[in-house]
Image (spheres, helix red, strand yellow):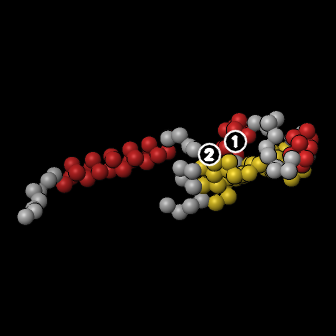
Amino acid sequence: MQFKIKGKKRVNNFWSWVLKVAQKRVKDTEDKTVNLISVTFPSAFCLLIRYEIINDGQKYEIVLQGDYQDAYKLWKESEEKDIPEAVKVEWMITANHSNAKLVSAKKL
């Protein structure tokens, strides 16, 4: 046999609201895990980085213009299209994430 004992409705509503706000703040401030999708060189003066934030499923693109001639040559010569070590992808994503273009987002 089960039954309920009446609780304090207003106090319960308040603490439920506090819990919802706190969970949102925790989610907004937690570390983001980045999954690098691809790094390509459309030309010797352009770098395209595609990556995904695993925590929320959003995909981003960063296009950077600069002098990437040496890295472009190494990338073109590589059969597996590996990322040249001269390109510091982690630093570029960290520095330019606020300017990245949101490509797609999963609906939660």
- Whether residue 96 sits left or right of residue 105 in the image: it is right
- Measuring 66% from the left and 44% from the top, which residue is drawn there? 98
Q: Residue 74: percent from the left, percent from the top?
A: 89, 42
Q: Residue furthest front?
A: 79
Mark 2 and mark 1: span between their CA atoms?
9 Å
Q: Quadrant of the N terminus?
A: bottom left
Q: Which of marks 2 and 1 is nearer the N terminus?
A: 2
Q: In the rendered image, which quarter is residue 95 located in? A: top right
Number of marks in the image? 2
- Measuring 16% from the left and 52% from the top, which residue is drawn there? 8
Q: Can you tell which mark lies on residue 93?
A: 1
Q: Can you tell which mark lies on residue 102?
A: none
Residue 8 or residue 102, whichever sits in front: 102
- Whether residue 40 sits left or right of residue 35 in the image: it is right
Of the residues shown, which amino acid type is indicated by label 1? Ile
Of the residues shown, which amino acid type is indicated by label 2? Val
Q: Residue 75: percent from the left, percent from the top?
A: 86, 46
Q: Give the number of the mark in front: 2 or 1.
A: 2
Q: Which residue lies furthest to the left in this view?
A: 1
Q: Residues within 10 Å of mark 1 (few under 14, many from 20)?
A: many
Q: Residue 14: percent from the left, percent from the top?
A: 27, 49
Q: From where the camera sits, is residue 1 visible?
A: yes
Residue 80, above or below 1: above
Q: From where the camera sits, is residue 72 visible?
A: no
Residue 33 or residue 46, whichever sits in front: 33
Q: How crowded is mark 2: few (under 14 residues within 10 Å), some or many (20 or more)?
A: some
Helix, strand or loop under label 2? strand
- Measuring 76% from the left and 36% from the top, which residue is drawn there? 88
Helix, strand or loop under label 1? helix
Residue 95 or residue 51, whichever sits in front: 51
Residue 25 or residue 79, whichever sits in front: 79
Q: Which residue is labeled 2 in the image?
A: 34
